[in-house]
Amino acid sequence: MSPSDAPVRIAIAGASGRMGQELIAAVLQNPAVQLVGAFDRAGSPSLGQDAGVTSGQHTSVAITADVAQALHNAQVFIDFTRPEGTFQHLEAARTLGVKAVIGTTGFSDEEKTRIAEFAAQNAIVFAPNMSVGVNVTFKLLELAAKALSTGYDIEVIEAHHRHKVDAPSGTALKMGEVLAEALGRDLKDCAVYERYGHTGERDPSTIGFSTIRGGDIVGDHTVLFAGTGERIEISHKSSSRAGYAQGSVRAATFLQRQSTGLFDMFDVLGLRD
């Protein structure tokens, strides 16, 4: 087997969490990749346990709080944690020359610039949603926005589980960015995130956002194009986190061919114009 055919060696951040366990399951199911590290925050009750603890699979990889130890044999790490944790992991990865797939959301514009700086040394795939289906949806939204640029009001509606801490979701914001760019606008200037009281008539140049939080909703996103006499809705609904995990593994294999640079799922899936 040539080096290019060898499985991509992957470490998982937040390994004991729901998404971490989904990522581990996806890695174990894919012969193109190999699990070599798993790490979580200090104090996690899963430290020292096998990384397949939730799925009941034996991996011979123990969950550790030592990021450097988890990354020492990895080529790529996948991170769906929190911004502050992701930056700590990136610092360790930079020292060790490990690439990154970042699905963490809630970054500020300044923090996104910092991620781009890391990518100048080690290649990174950074996207608010790693699902293949969601990214195809982004492309459909781009096409729809261009065709429905006049005479249609645009609203983004998203729903997630009660535990999600940021709103609107990173996916909803990315949808807004895709829509705004297709319309030749800047989302910062046209987004409306709240409506209350006497708001006056709707400004047709705006893009509205509605957020729902409740139960165990994995992630539902709908963009409504409301015209006169008709409505067009483009939706993506997730029934599990498996799609996010599978897309992340696909992104990790994409990075095998990259040394530096900041990429997103459009690059991974060949959707870039």
Image: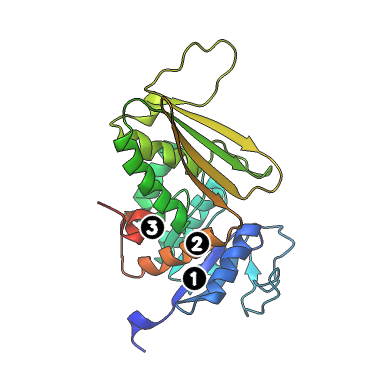
- Disc 1 crowd rating (10 Å Cα; few below 14, some 14-19, many 20+) is many
- Image point 67% across, 58% down: which residue? 42
Note whether residue 188 is visible.
Answer: yes
Q: Are marks 1 and 2 in contact (CB under 8 Å)?
A: yes
- Rendering coords of residue 18 (x, y %): 65, 58
- Give 182 or 45, whichever is nearer the viewer: 182
Q: Residue 124 — which label?
A: 3
- How far separated are the C-alphas under marks 1 and 2? 7 Å
In the rendered image, the residue lying farthest to the right is 45
| Sequence order check, earlier mark of 1 and 3 | 1
Left or right of 257 on screen, residue 239: right
* Residue receiving disc 1: 10
Mark 2 Cα shell of 10 Å, populated few (<14), some (14-19), many (≥20): many
Residue 63 location, x and y as percent?
64, 68
Name the image colouring: rainbow
- From this viewpoint, which residue is outermost toward the front? 229
Identity of the residue drawn at 55% across and 65% down: 12
Q: Earlier in the sequence, mark 1 or mark 2?
A: 1
Q: Which residue is mark 2?
A: 78
Number of other residues with Cα within 10 Å of mark 3, as a class: few under 14, some 14 to 19, many 20 or more = many
Three-letter amino acid code at the position of disc 1 = Ile
Q: Label 2 amino acid?
A: Ile
